[in-house]
Amino acid sequence: MNKNDKKTPKKRMTLKAVAEALGVSTATISNAFNRPDQLSANLRDHILKECERLGYNGPNPAARSLRTGATGIVGVMLAERLAYNFRDGCATEFLQGVSEVLDDARTNMLLMPGRDDFYHLQSMESIPDRYIVYGPPRDISVIERLERQQKPVVTVDFSLKNHLSLNVDNYGGAKQAANHVLKQIGSQGPVAVIGLRLIQSDIIGRIRETELLDAGVSISRQRLEAYRDAAADHGMQIPEELIWNTHESNWADGVKAAREALSAIPRPRALLCMSDQLAMAALSVARDMSISVPDQLRIVGFDDIPEARRSHPGITTVYQPSIEKGRLAAMMVLNPERFESRVLPTQLHVRETA
Amino acid sequence: MNKNDKKTPKKRMTLKAVAEALGVSTATISNAFNRPDQLSANLRDHILKECERLGYNGPNPAARSLRTGATGIVGVMLAERLAYNFRDGCATEFLQGVSEVLDDARTNMLLMPGRDDFYHLQSMESIPDRYIVYGPPRDISVIERLERQQKPVVTVDFSLKNHLSLNVDNYGGAKQAANHVLKQIGSQGPVAVIGLRLIQSDIIGRIRETELLDAGVSISRQRLEAYRDAAADHGMQIPEELIWNTHESNWADGVKAAREALSAIPRPRALLCMSDQLAMAALSVARDMSISVPDQLRIVGFDDIPEARRSHPGITTVYQPSIEKGRLAAMMVLNPERFESRVLPTQLHVRETA
DNA sequence: TTGAAAGCGTTACCAA
DNA sequence: TTGGTAACGCTTTCAA
């Protein structure tokens, strides 16, 4: 501790106060923080050191951003409330990728729920300078407000006119998976689908055609089309009664849907699941019902989250590069002019369940 | 679409512009947003409706916060870089709990890395009005700056003088776990520990006593003491050569440490792991080495993350209420005056590995 | 290399 | 119930 420490630091430090204390102008202090080239290195060092000593942490971000009109924050708009994204392996990996790049770029990230019923959101919406939108926001008005802001936007897992987008090949991956399974079971026996947010409503159970979300906006819908096309290629079809909807990719929803699906008569020979989480839940239900996998039942997932890899038996699934997707999204939003919209490849990973 | 739409909305809307457009004062507009009781309901409705039409999303947060000195944002200071927390089941559950409460309180959350080598951080540090600090930040200076800010702070998994803290009973849980294992193996055969961040350095391998972090700040150290005390109660001891350190609770670190530990001669009869992730990795190594669990080797974890529950065989572990911890931390930081520091209970969950 | 001063968009006091 | 107006803390031009 410096013995000459003043007892003053109770008062909140401002740039102006520091300037007075050091006997220089506010502009000089500001330059010391923002434009090193505008003053001598010596002076700058001195100033920075004194700021530290005085307990001044640098320019107040609110004032700075009011003045400059920018904050240096990247908003990550999530499809749902935040809590959901911490539960979902895929979202978690995506955010990990995003935060790696933003960390390295010394940029902060503000997570925002994509739901309108969170009123506090609206005023926060103007904070970020740029946006990553991860999945179609639950409320369309969120998008409308965002578009008015004229800020760089990268959409992930869906597309928006006039904005950069980043997608994965859902159709291709799902088709590979379905083809693989159908080949295994020799095109016989019913095939069921455990889908994820195929319809607007929250019900967990069989769907009805009329309610299906549009394939343009719903990646699940794209996967479903792929499953169906694959079935058709094998001279089969997947009837609506064998398509289950879940609302979240979680254990409970997966267990409920799988239990229903595996109670259908005749019992499905294969379960095409739209996430690994759902597939793992289905696997567990099969175990409980003493259905042998893969002999009596084939199961495939989607995403290839780490848990799927380590499960016993290992989940056969469609890999999508979630972390890489996050990294790329961050890079794209930081330098929009250097990128174009992209579709990342997916890939079938055959393990033991199919 | 309104046919009378002006073509003007190119210009960014401000409160002042709206006031002019509506022919009222800025104060009135401000009140419409912030103090409904200060004007007639009619006028307020009218104003809000017009704002919507004009594309004004409410007061600019930078200006508002400059003026009021508050932002309504809760900072969650993490121990490490962000990316780490999206990989860790425990952190993920904690953040889920936090975000549930903050969502409901209409409050935003700003995640911040607790490392000083991220310069961009410093200016962000003044944004939040209140802080949750999750684990001791890697750089102590982060804490020092935080304390100067005089904002409500809740520390989690460690304590700070003059601040609310929230901990779990690490010692009690670890002791239960160790006792259980020692009873099983009849107090014979060596017992090894796979620890987590027991020492400052990043090495994965055997520790040396002198380097151990202080028990006051390190929950791992508390767990280690419990393991040792339990051993002593059984007339045993855990020598330093059988204590491994890992840097992160992840698969790779766990595999490396477990592989070393299980190659020791004589081979340990039990592995006390400081996280489930490490325990699961150890389990996988045992499988690879054809060591039968629990017959030849007992394994216990810590945390009770969902994956531990579903693993086969199920991991015997110490449950800590991570989600609840997150919820409580958020409630505490929002209403510090209504709470006192707390230690949440932990609980041994016996499954199949010990 | 430094200083003076205008203004960024609000809010909150006080007056009307 | 409404309006006028002085801050809030900073950046940036322009001039010295």
Image: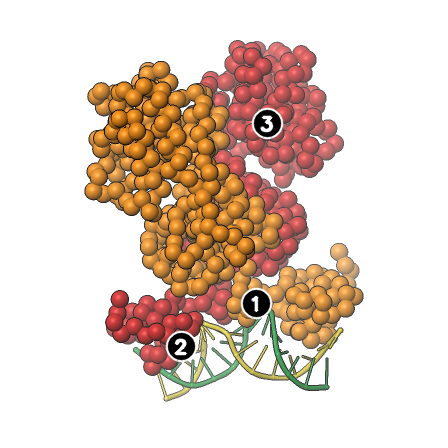
Chain colours: A orange, B red, C yellow, D green
Q: Residue B254 shows which numbered tag? A: 3
Task: Please state the horizontal and vertical placement of residue B243, each as a whole percent of the image.
Answer: 66, 24
- Please tell me in which quadrant of the rendered image residue B214 appears: top right
Residue A52 placement, left or right of B127: right
Residue A265: image quadrant is: top left
Q: Residue drawn at (61%, 56%), measured in percent from left and top?
A: B120
**Image x and y of residue A33, in percent:** 67, 65
* Residue at mark 3 to residue at mark 1: CA–CA distance: 45 Å
Name which quarter of the figure residue D12 lies in: bottom right
Answer yes or no: do the residues labelled 1 and 2 have beta carbons within 8 Å?
no
Q: Check the image and report above or below for B186 versus B252.
A: above
Crowd rating for badge 2 (residues with CA inside 10 Å; few <14, some 14–19, many 20+): some
Q: Are marks 1 and 2 on the same chain?
A: no
Judging by the rendered image, the residue that carries numbered circle 1 is A64
Residues under labels 1 and 2: Cα distance? 22 Å
- Helix or strand or loop: what does disc 2 sit on? helix
The amino acid beneath tag 3 is Gly
Horizontal side of residue B73 vs A215, given as left or right: right
Out of B247 and B151, give the one closest to the viewer.
Answer: B247
| Residue position for label 2 | B17
**Is residue A87 at all visible to an observer of this figure?**
no
Quarter holding the N terminus of chain B? bottom left
